[in-house]
Image: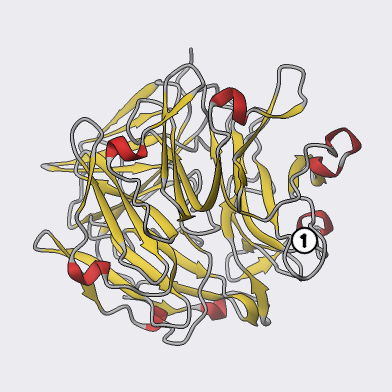
């Protein structure tokens, strides 16, 4: 399935780091890949037409940081995404405050490093972070779940001040979270699923008024005895399902039923225990069906495809990394050819970054990028693509995998189809747009409908 194309990274020395996220850092409309550094500089990799080159300025590079994960979203509604970076408190020294990088023209500033925000700057060891538009306003907050600490929700109030709104939203419970996803999972607005390392998972249903109720046990996803790690959302034939990677335990596939309840339906092969850290669902070969990728620590990675309506292990080629130390990873179409690349970070032990993609094929594709009213990526929007009798759904990524965030694009493989009947985009505020017979084999940007 995968071929190694790491030579497309122009300068790729051994790197210690964990998370990966995808966002447009320079406002030119094309995404860069942010790779966290642990005790060394973060990197911002930009495609220059031939290679990925590091364009991180000194602020984003944050060479003194112990960054574990990053998430991008438009916090202030200006059309540019801010970047929240979790820093480790680890045994290497006293806790370091998290960073909240905001763009000011071509410069970046750490908002949490400003005196006015000193009291709110997070010092605990954060791993899980996602963005959440709980009110459907096109302005996002950053959900941060720390080990043994209450969940935080950082938003801007009406006066532009940074506040923790977790208590107001009903999210301020203490969990040992490993991964988060935020999307319209069981309601019409953005819900929040928290995969937990020690203790039961949490599922927060959006009540439509900016507050949430916790319903994990009621909906069948509590799963109290497992140690969660990687997390991905899967297209489940009209409803979204959850793939939960488990550290040294049986991996879970929670299939959603009508009414919002879930049942655990992982096959024996898919559930087989491994030292998993990240899981990703994406259509790497553009056949019209997502593959499921389990990235393991110190063990071969595993890849599954839907065969005869059952998830079956398939050969994954160069990306098997039999003795690798995979941590965070993200998918993005770096060069615009319609095939997804996979970029993998390798943890505390310095190792060159890995970049993989599928060999070229004749399958069609369509990529949809919804925007907020301000022109930022509409993370949490749901995109539905209908081709003949086949319907696919994707949620624009607001946080997934493990320490990572995918590109803000709905990627659809079309197989041998050469025509798409329609595409529907539904934003977190309930607005919707339908594109009839869109052209294929291209990226389409869809603005938010006017009010």
Relative to 14, say whether 173 is above or below. Answer: above
- Residue drawn 32% across and 40% down? 217
Q: Nearer the viewer, residue 49 or 90?
A: 90
- Tell me if residue 339 can be seen: no
Relative to 163, say whether 226 is above or below. Answer: below
Task: Count up the numbered dots.
Answer: 1
Snapshot quadrant of residue 219: top left
Q: Position of residue 128 (x, y in %)?
A: 56, 51
Left or right for 32, reference 363: right
Left or right for 195, reference 66: left
- Residue drawn 18% across and 33% down? 258
Left or right for 112, reference 380: right
Q: Position of residue 111 (x, y in %)?
A: 80, 40
- Which type of secondary structure does the marked residue at label 1 adopt? helix
Residue to which mark 1 is pinned: 61
Question: Residue at the right extreme?
Answer: 115
Relative to 21, say whether 169 is above or below. Answer: above
- Residue drawn 78% across and 70% down? 92
User: How crowded is the residue under tag 1: few (<14 C-alpha within 10 Å), some, or many (20+)?
Assistant: many
Question: Residue at the bottom extreme?
Answer: 323
- Tell me if residue 230 can be seen: yes
């Amino acid at each position: 399935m995968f071929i190694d194309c790491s030579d497309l990274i122009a300068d790729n020395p051994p790197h210690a780091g964990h998370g990966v996220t995808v966002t447009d850092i320079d406002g030119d409309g094309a995404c860069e890949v942010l790779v966290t550094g642990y005790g060394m500089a973060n990197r911002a990799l930009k495609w220059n037409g031939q290679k990925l080159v590091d364009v991180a300025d000194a602020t984003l590079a944050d060479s003194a940081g112990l960054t574990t994960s990053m998430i991008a979203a438009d916090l202030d509604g200006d059309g540019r995404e801010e970047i929240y970076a979790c820093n480790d408190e680890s045994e290497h020294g006293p806790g370091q405050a998290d960073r909240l990088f905001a763009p000011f023209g071509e410069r970046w500033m750490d908002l949490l490093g400003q005196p006015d925000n000193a009291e709110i700057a997070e010092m605990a060891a954060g791993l899980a972070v996602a963005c959440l538009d709980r009110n459907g306003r096109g302005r996002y907050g950053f959900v941060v779940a720390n080990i043994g600490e209450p969940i935080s929700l950082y938003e801007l109030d009406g006066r532009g001040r940074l506040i923790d709104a977790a208590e107001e939203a009903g999210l301020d419970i203490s969990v040992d979270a490993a991964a988060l996803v935020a999307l319209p999972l069981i309601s019409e607005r953005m819900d929040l699923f928290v995969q937990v390392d020690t203790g039961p998972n949490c599922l927060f249903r959006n009540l439509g008024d900016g507050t949430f109720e916790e319903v994990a046990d009621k909906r069948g996803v509590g799963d109290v005895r497992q140690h969660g790690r990687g997390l991905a959302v899967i297209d489940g034939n009209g409803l979204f399902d959850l793939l939960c990677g488990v550290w040294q335990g049986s991996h879970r596939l929670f299939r959603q039923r009508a009414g919002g309840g879930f049942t655990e339906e992982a096959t024996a092969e898919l559930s087989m225990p491994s030292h998993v850290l990240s899981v990703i669902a994406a259509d790497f070969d553009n056949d019209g069906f997502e593959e499921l990728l389990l990235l393991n620590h110190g063990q071969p990675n595993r890849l599954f495809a839907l065969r005869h309506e059952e998830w079956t292990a398939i050969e994954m080629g160069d990306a098997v990394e039999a003795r690798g130390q995979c941590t965070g990873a993200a998918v993005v179409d770096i060069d615009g050819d319609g095939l997804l690349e996979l970029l993998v970070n390798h943890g505390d032990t310095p190792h060159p970054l890995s970049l993989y993609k599928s060999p070229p094929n004749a399958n069609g594709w369509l990529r949809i990028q919804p925007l907020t009213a301000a022109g930022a990526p509409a993370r949490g929007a749901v995109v539905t693509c209908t081709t003949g009798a086949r319907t696919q759904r994707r949620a624009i990524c607001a946080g997934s995998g493990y320490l990572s965030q995918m590109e803000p694009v709905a990627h659809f493989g079309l197989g041998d189809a050469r025509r798409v009947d329609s595409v529907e985009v539904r934003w977190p505020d309930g607005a919707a747009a339908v594109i009839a017979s869109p052209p294929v084999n291209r990226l389409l940007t869809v603005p938010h409908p006017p009010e």
